[in-house]
Amino acid sequence: MNLLATLRIAMNALRVNKLRSSLTMLGIIIGVAAVITMIAVGAGAQSRVEEQIKSLGSNLMIIIPGSTTASGVRLGAGANQNLTEDDALAIQKEVPEVQVAAPSTRGTGQVIAGNTNWSTQIYGVTPDYFEAREWPLLEGRMFEQAELNSSYKVAIVGQTVAKQLFGDMSPMDQTIRIKKVPFIIIGVLDRKGQSMMGQDQDDVVMVPLSTARNRLFGNAQGKLRRVSSIQVKVLQGASMQVAEDKIRDLMRQRQRTQQGQDDAFTIRNLTEILQAQETSSRVMTLLLAAVASVSLLVGGIGIMNIMLVSVTERTREIGLRMAVGARGRDILMQFLVEAVTLSLMGGLLGIALGVSASYAIGELAGWVTRLSPESIVLAVGFSAGIGIFFGFYPAHKASKLLPIQALRYE
């Protein structure tokens, strides 16, 4: 008996019991749909983490001041303003793994443009800051060295600030007032989106570091060139851990920290934090897929159950086929094709349901989902494998029946 004839017989047998075949496929349909949907949701979560990593900048570390104690009260990190621009220069010069070390200071303030105002974050930075954060301009230009040296009143704005102050108009060359100080907008930052903490990174105004310190924040220690943080970008391919250890040793030397004393600064390795989140997201995706795969296992058991019932019901038919010349392998192939057909048909319907569910979750729940061809191929292959695995035993049992016993079966 050729494969085409076997397939035709198997399809006729399934068509005779439409309701039973549909109920048998239901487990496979639900299982495949669940696997595809869960993988799509998990992959969407991973892509969200990857976007956050990209928005922060790759190989990035941030050095912030440590805590301090006043009258027996221990204040939080950042309370001890002991970082300077010279620290950033020393890190960039003496640590070979560092691509750039960008000092910055920050504060908040009301920004006014005409009759409109907006409260936002104000950063004092150097052009190295944009390189460290991998943050290009949408239009305009960066700060020039003369503007940094002479505390020029120029600003680069994020897209949220530009939208709030100017609407659809271009903010280029417009004048804004920050704490009653007029600034000319020379550039607009490209969109960054939300940070890993949910903060809008585009809600920001960048001004030259010296301008922020001397004209906006009123730093009484301006001559010491204090800064709020140092953004450190490590060279591609260099070890983040090695760079961190060298930076820590250098900073302890510069701050004359004695052996056994706590660091007067904190180094935050953002890349490692986000990579840990990405790993957790990947594990969660695998866990969701594993849970969804239980449905496929249940569906496979259902196929085996129904095929055993079918063998029992069709024992006389099997005996008759054998009596007219059918061999055991023909019977084996017939029932195996039936099982695989049930699995594949359920798998195809499951794909349609899973793709629809993924899009529905993305639209209705607002979750990020990402369908991958690999998950669809995996789900179909797995469903076919289930048909072969769970269909083999009933098919093998049918092929081993003796014709005389099968014909006598009541």
Image (spheres, rainbow, N blue to C red):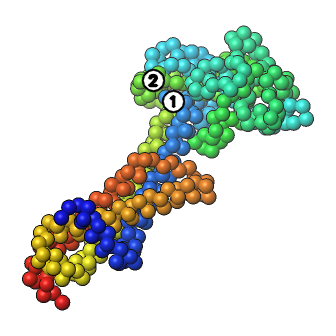
In the picture shown, does residue 185 fall above or below 369? above
In this rendered view, identify the residue nearer to me: 92 or 197.
197
Asked which quadrant contains residue 123, the reply is top right
In the picture shown, does residue 38 fall above or below 237? below
In this rendered view, identify the residue nearer to me: 156 or 37.
37
Question: At 68% from the left edge and 18% from the top edge, which residue is drawn?
Answer: 142
User: Which residue type does callout 1 highlight?
Assistant: Ser
Asked which quadrant contains residue 192, the reply is top right
Question: How many angstroms separate mark 1 from mark 2 (CA)?
Answer: 8 Å
The image shows residue 47 at horizontal and vertical percentages of 51, 43
The image shows residue 219 at horizontal and vertical percentages of 74, 23
Question: At 46% from the left edge and 39% from the top edge, which residue is drawn?
Answer: 275
Q: Is residue 8 left or right of residue 227?
A: left
Question: At 84% from the left edge and 27% from the top edge, which residue is drawn?
Answer: 176
In this rendered view, identify the residue nearer to me: 362 or 84.
362
Label 1 SS: loop
Q: Looking at the image, is mark 1 or mark 2 earlier in the sequence? A: 1
Label 1 Cα crowd, 10 Å radius (few <14 / some 14-19 / many 20+): some
User: Which residue type does callout 2 highlight?
Assistant: Gln
Query: Which residue lies under the disc numbered 1?
Result: 58
Q: Residue furthest top?
A: 146
Q: Are marks 1 and 2 in contact (CB under 8 Å)?
A: yes
Q: Residue furthest bottom?
A: 410
Query: Which residue lies under the disc numbered 2?
Result: 236
| Image quarter in which the C terminus is found | bottom left
In the picture shown, does residue 352 fall above or below 320? above
Q: Is residue 158 left or right of residue 24?
A: right
The image shows residue 318 at horizontal and vertical percentages of 18, 77
Q: Which mark is residue 251?
A: none
The answer, for residue 393, to whether it is visible in the render is no
Q: Is residue 106 left or right of residue 334?
A: right
